């Protein structure tokens, strides 16, 4: 694809992101005329409750969708390149399992452990994700082959799921319902101050991700080749893991595990740009992720369904398409 | 120490920082209790242990104080300031403040609906969580005007805000409600209603007085509640000639949950002159027993309160094919957990009629006029 065409692609992606953001802010459960929405955003004279809905509910939610879509898609891209596996995603290292364990212990386990958690769900999810990161970092310094890390990540996730299942089995139905709803994801629970933290963490993660563009490009050639090119493999690996943790870990802590965006959207970015270099793929993935998650938020608002069921229904066809069009998978 | 470990540590530190700041911003409410002037006991419950209503000398406003509003809470106190006469809320120790009385109430639990109804304030409800699962006829009749705000953890805040609630009644499951932060941000007053933690059936019903205080119908609520212990205790104190053994619940897959011996349901069984068959669980919460134990317990019982999806005896047998039971099986309506919360005397009357069908001592109802249970046949 020529540089000119690429510029058009990026311009359209940015325009689509902005248009969907505005649509997401304009549409909601309450009918608000466009003029009032605009006045609320620009600080004009409107009914305080209208302004509250537009600024504290819709604007925050749309911004959360934007940030989460970018974060998940970029960390998915990083994981796919790092593991040289088209079906890797942001949660392959066990971040979402770790977060879910934190939340499960808080929501389901407190009666068993005899403690009442003074922490909120966000904090519990963070502690869970950080513990998994710590375990993965400790291991990743000792291994040569990245595939070992993939296997360990999956094993760790399975072990954590087993513990979460035990907690679910033994818990009261109200607690169970709270937990199950958490696993369905929610973009709307984030408050203004929390959004500031989310934005800071995602920006930091994206900056670190930009720093990994060159190592990621080299990793495409294979680890052996990358090593002969003089790439410090273990160091690059650690930085990529750090970036993914900041991106996917923060999103999971605030919004619950949101599936399929991170797995599917990098493939859409590849298909649109027809490029393999991360200088193009990374921003394209970020934009595609944002567009699709904002779109999913719109659909989930209109149908009044949890965000995760929408992202799955959008993401699964993409994953099937990847598997079928990949020559090494199809017959 | 090498670079890799340094990066790992840096990541952990960064996460820790975010963690601390995230935690910090959830604590924007002063927590030191200093609603000190409010020492007058406006209402102290006789049976409930989770709430009391306090007043101050020379002031008309009250504080509804709720202690340990979720399971496992240790000395957690939440106070709602109910302002009368334009009086200002104390500076700290108060979670939310409303102006007396709350005219527009959103209920996050169906039991809140029942308690408000019992206190004569059903018309104050403008929103509920899970409208389809509420049995209350007044709520169902008003479906078109009552908003369904969705579920705890994934709430439609926009709709909630558009209902212009004076207060949202919430609950905590093993910890503070995830709604707290967002409600704070939107400036919507809220209060924990912890009635489900009361193991005493009368204590649970007494919460109607707390809800009456919020809605401005406390006097009616006190009057409505007063007859409940009378009726309840009259049935409880009846001398029965027999004590049937009672089995509870049906399994999910192959795990059969049995309530604790000090649970709400166990208390009702005991007070109705029955004997709860399982004495092996005094942990304070429901625990699964294995199918062999459950099979023996069921075989030993004369009465089985199934609490299941099955509405016929064939349905019950096909859902529990390995269980042999020769007694009478009763299922309950969903309303047992809704309006039943406010009517423990009626539940007790039902159970006494089920347990002692031949005795009419003090029981006017026959098995044919049960309100919350029905015979599977």
Image (cartoon, coloured by chain):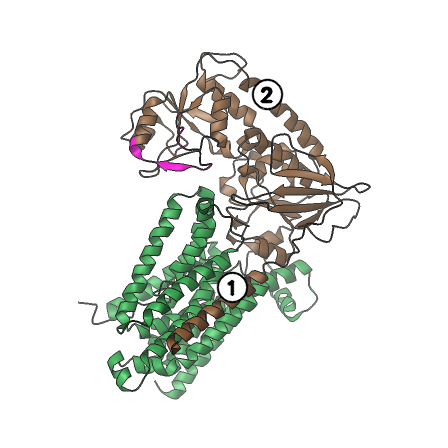
Give the residue at mark 1: B19
Q: Which residues are magenta?
A: B277-292
Q: Residue at x 63, y 42 (%)?
A: B66
What shade has chain A been given?
green
Can I make out residue B12 in this image? yes
Give residue B254's position: percent from left, percent from top. 31, 38
| Mark pair 2, 1: CA separation | 53 Å
What quarter of the picture does the C terminus of chain A occupy?
Answer: bottom left
Q: Residue at x 27, y 81 (%)?
A: A221
* Outermost residue to the front: B1
Give residue B355's position: percent from left, percent from top. 44, 19
The residue nearer to you, when weighing B130 against B346, is B346
Res. A234 image quadrant: bottom left
- Secondary structure type for disc 1: helix
Does residue B280 belong to the magenta stretch? Answer: yes
Q: Residue at x 53, y 30 (%)?
A: B340
Give residue B262's position: percent from left, percent from top. 48, 31
**Label 1 chain ID:** B
């Amino acid at each position: 694809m020529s540089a000119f065409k690429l510029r058009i692609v990026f311009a359209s992606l940015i325009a689509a992101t902005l248009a969907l953001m505005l649509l997401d802010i304009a549409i909601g459960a309450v009918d608000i005329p466009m003029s009032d929405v605009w006045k609320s955003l620009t600080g004009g004279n409107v009914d305080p409750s209208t302004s509250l809905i537009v600024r504290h509910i819709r604007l925050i939610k749309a911004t959360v969708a934007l940030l989460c879509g970018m974060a998940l898609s970029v960390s998915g891209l990083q994981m796919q390149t790092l593991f040289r596996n088209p079906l890797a995603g942001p949660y392959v290292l066990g971040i979402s399992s770790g977060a879910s364990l934190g939340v499960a212990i808080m929501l389901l386990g407190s009666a068993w452990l005899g403690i009442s958690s003074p922490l909120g769900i966000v904090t519990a999810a963070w502690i869970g994700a950080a513990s998994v990161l710590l375990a993965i970092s400790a291991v990743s310094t000792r291994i040569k082959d990245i595939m070992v890390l993939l296997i360990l990540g999956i094993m760790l996730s399975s072990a954590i799921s087993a513990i979460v299942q035990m907690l679910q089995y033994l818990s009261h139905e109200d607690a169970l319902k709270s937990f199950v709803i958490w696993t369905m994801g929610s973009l709307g629970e984030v408050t203004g101050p929390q959004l500031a933290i989310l934005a800071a963490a995602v920006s930091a993660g994206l900056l670190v991700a930009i720093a990994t563009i060159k190592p990621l490009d080299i990793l495409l050639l294979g680890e052996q080749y990358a090593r002969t090119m003089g790439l410090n493999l273990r160091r690059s690996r650690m930085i990529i893991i750090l970036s993914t943790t900041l991106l996917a870990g923060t999103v999971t802590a605030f919004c619950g595990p949101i599936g399929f965006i991170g797995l599917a959207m990098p493939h859409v970015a590849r298909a649109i740009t027809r490029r393999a270099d991360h200088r193009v793929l990374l921003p394209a993935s970020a934009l595609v992720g944002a567009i699709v998650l904002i779109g999913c938020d719109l659909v989930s608002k209109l149908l009044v369904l949890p965000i995760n069921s929408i992202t799955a229904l959008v993401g699964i066809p993409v994953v099937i398409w990847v598997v079928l069009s990949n020559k090494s998978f199809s017959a | 120490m090498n670079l890799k470990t340094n990066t790992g540590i840096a990541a952990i530190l960064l996460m820790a920082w975010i963690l601390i700041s995230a935690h910090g911003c959830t604590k924007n409410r002063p927590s030191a209790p200093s609603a000190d002037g409010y020492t007058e006991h406006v209402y102290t419950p006789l049976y409930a242990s989770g709430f009391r209503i306090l007043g101050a000398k020379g002031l008309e406003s009250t504080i509804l104080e709720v202690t340990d509003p979720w399971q496992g809470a240790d000395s957690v106190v939440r106070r709602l300031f109910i302002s009368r006469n334009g009086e200002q809320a104390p500076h700290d120790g108060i979670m939310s403040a409303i102006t007396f009385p709350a005219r527009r109430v959103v209920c996050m639990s169906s039991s809140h609906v029942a308690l408000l109804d019992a206190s004569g304030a059903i018309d104050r409800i403008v929103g509920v969580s899970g409208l389809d699962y509420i049995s209350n006829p007044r709520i169902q009749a008003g479906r078109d005007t009552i908003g369904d705000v969705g579920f705890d953890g994934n709430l439609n805040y926009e709709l909630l805000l558009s209902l212009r609630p004076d207060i949202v009644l919430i609950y905590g499951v093993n910890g503070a409600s995830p709604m707290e932060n967002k409600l704070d941000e939107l400036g919507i007053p809220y209060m924990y209603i912890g009635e489900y933690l009361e193991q005493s059936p009368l204590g649970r019903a007494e919460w109607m007085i707390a809800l009456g205080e919020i809605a401005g119908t406390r006097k009616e609520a006190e009057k409505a509640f007063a007859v409940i212990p009378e009726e309840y205790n009259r049935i409880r104190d009846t001398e029965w000639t027999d004590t049937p053994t009672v089995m509870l619940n049906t399994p999910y897959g192959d795990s059969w949950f049995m309530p604790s011996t000090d649970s709400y349901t166990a208390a009702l069984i005991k007070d109705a002159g029955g004997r709860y068959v399982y004495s092996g669980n005094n942990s304070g919460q429901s625990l699964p027993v294995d199918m062999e134990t459950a099979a023996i317990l069921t075989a030993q019982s004369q009465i089985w309160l199934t609490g299941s999806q099955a509405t016929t005896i064939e349905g019950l047998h096909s859902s529990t094919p390995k269980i042999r039971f020769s007694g009478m099986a009763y299922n309950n309506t969903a309303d047992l957990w809704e309006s039943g919360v406010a009517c423990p005397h009626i539940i007790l009357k039902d159970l006494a009629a089920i347990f002692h069908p031949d005795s009419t001592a003090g029981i006017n109802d026959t098995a044919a006029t049960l309100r919350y249970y029905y015979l599977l046949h």
